[in-house]
């Protein structure tokens, strides 16, 4: 009886086990189907976003900083110069770190121009003709970057090897040139060099996602202190010219949200383009399609896990990151006290994911936003300096307060500035509540 009873229960146990396994398998297949479906729908969104961002990159609307802009686009002017810019960048010697540091201290006003190292003085002399032609390109009517310098261009384009580095080198030289011109008593000419440099740095903020924003902010940082000295020493006419140009440059710096819209379309191509359906890849423009195939395949291969696990982990992770950037877009242009806690909360929520790829690829958007805050503050300080210097020239005294820097203009997050008396009847301008490290000094 016992043996017969045990034998009779075997089919029942088999049915129960098989049924349980079937349910687990069906649940797994259902989860896998939902994962694939979500990724497919997100990829459709990315394809549409790529086309939208490419169209935006082709029609950058920004004010020219000059009264009579040169006809044509920045893309046309820089496109002709790029082979020469890349050749100059490649041929320049690599200075020892102490030399670069000493030259940066002259650029930033920590040391006098008389202490500029020979290596950097010679670099300015070598690069001056090309630098002037590059800065002149900023005066074009349309601020579109040339093909090969934007994120959705073919990764095999010859300009992709160096991207924006040759232009950053020119802007570093321009900052030193402003110092040299001012030291020679050519402050009005130095202001012109400065304004062209600031305008070109502004144009680098378009079409290159977060990288473009950070290159633009860094380049404005190169120029800030030397521009402040030039504006302080310029004639009232030169200061008036600076006031007009800065009121045009500042509002047309790309908001960080614009860069994140590029990032939201570009990031999935680099990380997961190899997982897109063939029809979705075919719907991409050629450069974006090449980036999706080449760069994502390299990223998947480089992951420290078996290929099949890497594929599944990425299939789960990248739509979450795509969604996270969309959340950040909605808040990165808010004032810091509103932005920071909301970005932190978004980060905490997504970091709770079990998938390690999510935490490994999440970006610190608050850090980027702080750098763009500083860039805007620098431009506001330069404009305020030009304004108070003209008030001083007209009345003989410093103003007791700042007038509106952008009357009748919409400007993202204008900086609240303080005026403080300095030594020897000078005037210190600095952002409210900040230390004097980010400040300019107006001298009598």
Image: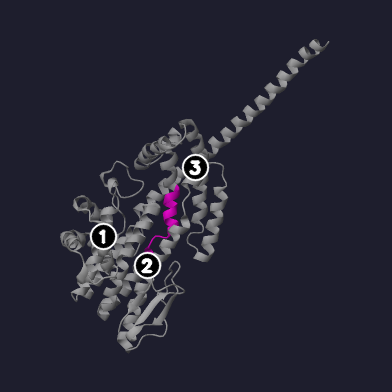
Secondary structure mostly seen in magenta is helix
Q: CA distance from mark 3 to mark 1?
A: 39 Å
Which is more foreground, mark 3 or mark 2? 3
* Residue carrying label 3: 357
Counting every numbered tag in the picture gives 3
Q: Which residue corresponds to the image point at 45% horizontal and 68% vertical from the top-left?
A: 413
Q: Is residue 254 magenta?
A: yes
Judge from the rendering whether residue 335 lies leftward or rightward of residue 81; answer left or right: right
* Residue carrying label 2: 250
* Residue carrying label 1: 98
Do callouts 2 and 1 mark residues in contact (Cβ within 8 Å)? no
* Quarter holding residue 186: bottom left
Question: Residue 369, relative to residue 15: is it above or below?
Answer: below
Front residue of 5 and 34? 5
Which is more foreground, mark 2 or mark 1? 1
Which region shows up in magenta? 250-264
SS at badge 3:
helix
SS at badge 2:
helix
Quadrant of the rendering where the N terminus is positioned: top right
Q: Is residue 189 magenta?
A: no
């Amino acid at each position: 009886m016992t043996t017969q009873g045990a034998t009779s229960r075997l089919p029942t146990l088999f049915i129960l086990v098989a049924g349980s396994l079937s349910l687990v398998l069906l649940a797994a297949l259902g989860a896998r189907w939902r994962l694939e479906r979500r990724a497919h729908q997100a990829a459709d969104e990315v394809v549409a976003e790529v086309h939208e961002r490419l169209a935006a990159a082709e029609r950058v609307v920004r004010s020219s900083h000059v009264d009579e802009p040169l006809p044509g686009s920045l893309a046309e002017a820089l496109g002709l110069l790029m082979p020469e810019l890349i050749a100059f960048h490649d041929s320049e010697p690599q200075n020892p770190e102490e030399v670069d540091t000493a030259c940066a201290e002259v650029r930033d006003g920590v040391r006098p121009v008389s202490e500029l190292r020979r290596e950097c003085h010679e670099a300015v002399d070598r690069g001056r003709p090309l630098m002037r032609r590059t800065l002149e390109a900023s005066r074009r009517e349309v601020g579109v970057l040339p093909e090969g310098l934007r994120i959705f261009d073919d990764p095999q384009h010859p300009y992709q090897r160096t991207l924006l580095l040759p232009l950053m080198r020119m802007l570093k030289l321009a900052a030193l040139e402003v110092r040299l011109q001012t030291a020679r008593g050519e402050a009005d000419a130095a202001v012109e060099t400065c304004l062209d440099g600031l305008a070109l740095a502004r144009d680098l903020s378009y079409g290159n996602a977060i990288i473009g924003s950070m290159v633009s902010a860094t380049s404005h940082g190169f120029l800030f202190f030397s521009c402040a000295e030039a504006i302080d020493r310029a004639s009232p006419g030169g200061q008036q010219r600076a006031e007009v140009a800065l009121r045009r440059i500042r509002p047309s710096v790309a908001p960080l949200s614009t860069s994140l819209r590029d990032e939201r379309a570009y990031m999935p191509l680099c990380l997961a383009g190899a997982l897109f359906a063939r029809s979705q890849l075919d719907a991409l423009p050629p450069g974006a399609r090449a980036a999706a195939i080449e760069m994502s395949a390299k990223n998947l291969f480089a992951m420290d896990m078996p290929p099949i696990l890497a594929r599944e982990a990425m299939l789960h992770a990248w739509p979450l990151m795509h969604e996270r950037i969309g959340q950040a877009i909605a808040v990165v242009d808010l004032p810091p006290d509103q932005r920071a806690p909301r970005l932190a909360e978004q980060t905490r929520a997504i970091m709770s994911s079990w998938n390690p790829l999510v935490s490994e690829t999440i970006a610190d958007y608050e850090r980027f936003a702080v750098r763009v805050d500083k860039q805007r503050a620098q431009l506001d300080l330069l404009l305020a300096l030009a304004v108070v210097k003209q008030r001083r020239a007209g009345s003989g005294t410093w103003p007791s307060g700042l007038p509106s820097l952008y009357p009748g203009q919409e400007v993202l997050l204008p900086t609240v500035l303080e005026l403080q008396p300095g030594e020897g009847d000078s005037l210190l301008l600095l952002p409210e509540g900040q230390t004097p490290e980010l400040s300019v000094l107006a001298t009598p």
